[in-house]
Image: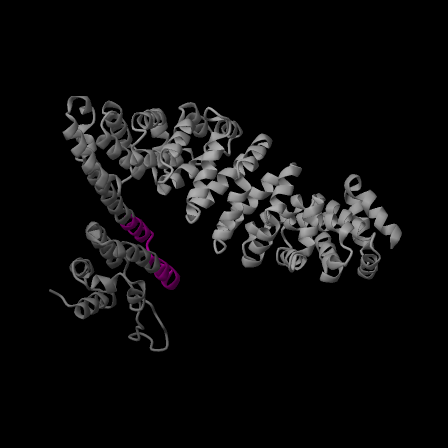
Amino acid sequence: MITNQSAREKVFSSFKNGKETAAKMTYQCSSSSSMNDLSKPTSIYANIGKRNNDNNKNKRCWSIRTDYLKNVFCSLSATSKTFDAKYKYRCAFTIITLCFAVVFKMMNIHCSLLVYGSTLVFEIFNARSSQQHSREKKNAAREEDSPAEKCDGMIPKLDSDAVQKALEELVQVTHKHRRSSYISVVLNAAQHYIESEQIVELAFSNLYNILGSNKQNCIRTFVQKDGINIISTAMKHHANNIIIQEKACSIYWSVIGGNSTNKSLVARAGGIHLIIDAMKRHPDSFFFLEEACGVLSNLAVDSNNRLIIAQVGIAPGEGIVSIISAMENHSRSVVLQKRACGALSNLALNSDNRVTIAASGGVNAILTAMEEHTESSRAQEIACNALANLALDNMTNKRTIGQQGGIDAILKAMKHHPDAALLQKHACAALADLATNAGNSVRILRATNGIQVIIATMQRYLDSSVVQEKACIIFGNLAAIDVDSTICESGGIRSIISAMKYHKNSVGVQSKGCWALQELSQLLCSLVVIRRENPKDILCDASDRFPDECRGAAKSVLVKL
């Protein structure tokens, strides 16, 4: 066997001396570890040309014979199928380097050299395609030998023990290989043995494994095979089996995702009624309740589903009551609280549901969640959004939230999580809605550092038009009762003007900013500050850009300046 060093030296000497042994030496090197060096472009490139001083010592002449390189390329082509992956790309790069080196140094290379080089590259990648085809063939063979394929089409003929054993084996497979081809077999087993709890549990475990990856082809196959109705039927037959109920909720959640059609299909199959019924049957299983609240939260994004959830049961609002009861019974589960708050937040987008949620103790449940989980920015964010939706166009709810400590809870969340952008946005939106109530305006002004917290948020999130607009609404509502000039002394006027400068094209920021300055200008101390800041150009620009929304308020302030 030729050593690395000797192999390299002999091949390089064949380039220099013109011996007809290049192809033979390259073939030998391809089967040894020396190929690791030969396949590096720099190793060959450094030895392509040598100074030939036989004729003229002062003249540099690069010499290499085309037919020797042809032999090298042909030899590499013959052995390319045995290369490892790391050598294939090195060899391809080597060919390119050799061709360019010779072209630029010699300029008299024969064109057929490029043909041989191209042939080698083709052989290298053709070998790679052959290996990939071989891998796909092996994977197909594994699928054929899987337990799912063995019992496919034979499930009605097999006894329950055989089906159960096959599903047990399949659980290990679907945990790693989530293939849509397994779904038909699993659903077939669940449908034919719907009375068997063990088989249904195993079938749901397999479906959970497959659909948990959220692959669209798997979800599409599941829906096409009538999987949603099969899940609903199983939930009816095994209403007291908490494992089946929990897995069913997890499968529903995976299937509906952001697909509005699938959300409607779940509702049509009775999924909402079954989930809420299971929540009433199993009030102590918080793992199941977490999944149930998550599914209901996702389903409630659809406006029709909001009505269905609220109308489930003999008495109206049983679905909402079930969610609030879960929050009250498992207040320490941060996962459940986040998902339940999300469900109430989506449900509160319906005006009738806002009344039902508040009447059922939903406000207190949300505030308790905020108090229990102050360190979870996500929980605080969803809770603030829920309070904002509950306060929307409902004066009774605004008063209830303020009286139960909602203002302090929101400001506390803003203080604890200044870097949570979504939390700050939802918190400002909630305070803007709540501030339209006179009692809440007083609470915001009297809260410890309440105004300073809002201004700090405006400064930190100057690029957020939502934050700036909502903060302007807050200050505009507080201006009439700010007898102590808290907003003025804390820098609120300067923040409003900065927001208007930054968001010149935002009609919301411009209109609410002009309105806030108009309200604040009614106080003498605030008017002095406004004159000092001199926002004439900003007000005129806002009036010209948005005459219908800004001209009246802007003119009112400009007259006083």
Image x and y of residue 79, in percent: 19, 52
Which range of residues does the magenta coloring cover?
99-121
Horizontal side of residue 220 vs 417, given as left or right: left
At x 70%, y 43%, the residue is 436
Who is closer to the viewer here, 475 or 481?
A: 481
Q: Is residue 545 left or right of residue 250?
A: right
Residue at the (45%, 30%) spot, across then down: 263
Q: Quadrant of the C terminus?
A: bottom right
The quarter of the image holding the N terminus is bottom left
Queried whether the magenta region covers residue 292, the answer comes back as: no
Q: Nearer the viewer, residue 143 or 366?
A: 366
Horizontal side of residue 22 vs 50, given as left or right: left
Q: Residue furthest right?
A: 559
| Residue 207 seen | no
Most common SS among magenta residues: helix
Up-down relation of residue 292 to residue 543 (above or below): above
Expressed as whole percent of the image width and height from the top left, the position of residue 468 reads 67, 51
Image coords of residue 482 (percent x, y): 76, 54
Tell me the quarter of the picture where residue 38 sits.
bottom left
- Colour approach in the figure: one colour
Vertical position of residue 353 compared to residue 408: above or below: above
Give coordinates of residue 13: x percent, y percent.
Answer: 22, 68
